[in-house]
Image (cartoon, rainbow, N blue to C red):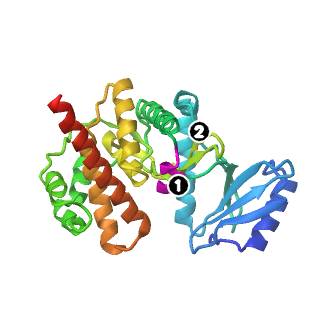
Amino acid sequence: MPIHRPDIETAKKILADAYKSGLIPFDAKTIEPYCEGGGALTLKCIDTDRTEYVVRFPNTENKLNNMLQEIDTLQFLDAQNLSVKGGIKIPQPHYVTHDTYPFVWHQALVGQTLLPHSYHELNEKQKSDLAKKIAIFMHAMHTCKLPNISGKTPTDFIMAQMKLRDLDILGPKIPAPILQKYKTLKLNTNYPETLCHFDMHGRNMALDPKTKDLVGIFDFGDTSIRSCFLDFYKLSFIHRDLTRRVIDIYNKISNIKIDIHDVDLAYLCTIARQYEHSPNDGILNKSLENFVQDVTSAQIQNAQSHKI
């Protein structure tokens, strides 16, 4: 039978039946939608002991296959002991079969997401601790043995996507000297290919609401083998200050040395494509504003250090 996405009431019945049949370990007393869009149905389920779970119902066979591939990836990373080595929790998803409404569930990594405005609210120690945890996690992931998975994306393919001429669209947002610097940048293409999360933005992070400590990283659907510098640029959607801090720590603990300007170029080429279609997007514009501010500040500090 074809796979369909259930409505909320049908999903509740399916989960109740799954619990009675011993297919899932939780009795969802509270069920709320994380997402009610046209794609997969994602639910937040709270058990009688207040433990929170995430349940995802795919809407197509292709979406189900993507979920199953992510499960394989996470099982591989669990076997690599990534959560212990990286010091951060990652999901442990499970698949429940159903002729029409199969679903995937895992215990939720509860916490706040990290948006640009919330990063500004962190104090200096919290920013340093956050950068350290991310750097250690990324180093642990980049030193995992390479799995036999699809999704390898060679650097030459990525380079083909980085159309430098497209950066001109950012002209109103980025001072001409900074824009010209990146348009003429010679990108290092000799980074090793490693296992990358490749979606390290703030919506895929869980921070403790009180301490602001990073407690979880999720959404490994884009995990693949890529040129390792490409695993850093989405951090700049939070703030380039965070990207810079993470790279500084990463370069101290890793044999791989990342040049932030290569990461900047990947960020700018990506955001230029998004900006072309959504020039009034508040998050994009704030991200660009933060980028310019941090690059300018770094240039001033560098100039002052040379005078000394």
Q: Residue 212: which quarter of the image?
A: top right
- Amino acid, disc 1: Arg
Foreground of the two, 262 or 130: 130
Q: Position of residue 236 (x, y in %)?
A: 38, 50
Q: Which residue is disc 2 drawn over? A: 213
Q: On the rendered image, what quadrant is the C terminus found in?
A: top left
For image coordinates 34% across by 67% down, the residue present is 274
Q: Position of residue 84 (x, y in %)?
A: 58, 28
**Disc 1/disc 2 C-alpha distance (Å):** 15 Å
Whether residue 139 appears in magenta in the rendering, the answer is no
Whether residue 115 appears in magenta in the rendering, the answer is yes
Q: Which residue is disc 1 drawn over? A: 203
Q: Answer few, some or many: residues within 10 Å of disc 1's Cα (few below 14, many 20 plus, some between 14 and 19).
A: some
Describe the element under mark 1 as helix, strand or loop.
helix
Q: On the rendered image, what quadrant is the N terminus found in?
A: bottom right
- Residue 195 is marked as none
From the viewer's perspective, is residue 62 above or below residue 250? below
From the viewer's perspective, is residue 59 above or below residue 74? below
- State yes or no: discs 1 and 2 in contact (Cβ < 8 Å): no
Q: Answer few, some or many: residues within 10 Å of disc 2's Cα (few below 14, many 20 plus, some between 14 and 19).
A: some
- Left or right, 98 with respect to 147, comes to right
- Amino acid, disc 2: Asp
Q: Magenta segment range?
A: 114-122
Task: Give the mark nearest the N terminus, 1 or 2.
Answer: 1
Tell me the mark number nearer the camera, choosing from 1 and 2.
Answer: 2
For image coordinates 24% across by 45% down, the residue present is 262
Describe the element under mark 2 as helix, strand or loop.
loop
Q: Position of residue 227 (x, y in %)?
A: 30, 42
From the viewer's perspective, is residue 125 above or below residue 204? above
Total numbered badges shown on the rendered structure: 2
Foreground of the two, 256 or 100: 256
